[in-house]
Image: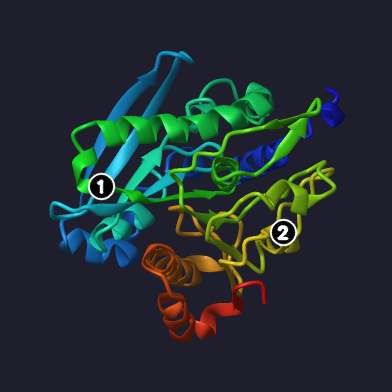
Amino acid sequence: MNLSKHRLLAGTLGVALVALAASFLSPAAVAEPPSPASIAEAAAAEEAASVTWTDLDWHDDARGRAVPARLYRPAGDGPHALVVFSHGIGGSRAGYSYLGRHFAQQGIASLHVQHVGSDRSLWAGNPLTIVTRLHDAAQESEAMHRARDLSFALDRLLAGPHGAALDAQRIAVAGHSYGANTAMLATGARVVRDGRAIELRDARFKAALLLSSPPFYGERDLAAVLRDVSVPSLHVTTTEDVIRIPGYESPASDRISVFDAFGDQRKALAVFAGGSHSVFTDRTGTGGGVSLNMRIKAATRELAVAFVRSAFDGGEAPLREWGQRHRELMARYAIGGG
C-alpha cells in the first residue's frame, strides 16, 4: 500500500492509526464510550438538572448517507446558542456526553453528529481487517463527507421542530481529533487539490472549538491552509497530546502549530499539564489516571462554555476568569496570538 499518495486533508490516516493503537490497549472502551453515569463527578450536576436529549436519525438522499445525531436540549424556549460537535474516529453521537450535557445545563444546545463512514462501526467485524477499515475511514472522501454531514445536520435541525428554539446567528462548530479536522474544514480551512481549492466552509458556523487538532500532513504551508478561517477559535490540548505512529509521529507541539497558523487573532489556547490525546473523550482512565482525567474534563467543559459566551456575547472576560480559576492545571494559557 503506497501511503505517500494518501496525504490526507489533516493527517487523518495518522489519527486512524492512533485510534487503532488505542483499540489494541482497550478495544471496548474505544468502541463504545461509557455511559454518563460512569463519569459520576463530571455528570452529577447535569443529572440533577435533568438535562434531556433526543436522538435524531436523518438520511441525506443526495449522498446516500445516514446522518444520525443526538441533540442535548436546554430548558426553556430559547433562543439558544448551538454547538455542532464532530467526534473523533471510531466515535458516535453518544460520545463526549460530558460536554453535551454541560452545554445544555448552561443554556446552550449541543448537536452531536455521527459520521457513519468513520464511526464506532469500524471496531466491529474481523479484527484482521481493522487496518483496512481504518484506512478507508481516513480517506479524503470521508474527510469531506464529514464536513458535509455537519452542514446537512444543521439544515435539518434548523428546519425541524427544534429549530424555533435555536438562535441561527449563534452557532459554533466543535470537534475532537478527526472531529477538529472536520470543524476546521467547515470553517474555511483551504486545501488545494489539482489546482483547485476544496471549499467546505459553512458560513453559519461563527466560532470553532478545537480539541487535539491533528496536523495537516503533507501540507508545507500550514498558514496557507488556515489563514482563511476567520472565526473566533479555541484550541485545547495537553502537554502529552502525542501521536506515536512510525511515519506519522505527531508531537504535542503540532497542536500549537495549528493554533499559531490561525490568522484570525480572536483565538485562545489552553494547554493542560499532563493528560493525553484521548483525555477529552468520555473515557475516564486516560491521561494521568482518573483524578487528573476528571479535573481536565471538568475544566474543559467550563472553558467550552466560557468560549461560546465570549465568542457570541463579546469580550474576553469569561476566558480570563476561567484562566484565573484553573491556573494550577495549565502549562500554558494564551488569549490572542501571545
Q: Nearer the viewer, residue 272 or 223?
A: 223
**Which residue sits at x=48%, y=33%?**
120
Residue 308 - label: none
Q: Nearer the viewer, residue 266 or 140?
A: 266
Question: The disc labelled 1 sits on which kind of residue?
Answer: Leu
Q: Position of residue 266 (x, y in %)?
A: 56, 66
Check disc 2 and give the amino acid type.
Ala
**Residue found 76% across the figure and 49% down from its top:** 224
Quarter of the image for residue 301 reads bottom left
Numbered disc 2: secondary structure? helix
Seen from the viewer's position, the closer of residues 285 and 5 is: 5
Left or right relative to 219: residue 116: left
| Left or right: 276 in relation to 221 | left
Which quarter of the figure is the N terminus placed in?
Answer: top right
226 vs 247, left or right, is: left
Kindly state the secondary structure of the residue where label 1 is placed. strand
How would you rate the neighbour count of disc 2 (Cα within 10 Å): few for under 14, some for 14-19, many for 20 or more? Answer: some
Residue 213 visible within the image: yes
Residue bearing mark 2: 261
For the residues labelled 1 and 2, the Cα–Cα distance comes to: 32 Å
Name the spot of residue 88 as percent of width and height, x first. Answer: 54, 43
> What residue is rendered at 70% in x and 37% in y?
9
Q: Which residue is mark 1?
A: 166
Work out which quarter of the rendered image holds the C terminus and state it. Answer: bottom right
Q: Is residue 100 above or below residue 163?
A: below
Colouring rule applied to residues? rainbow
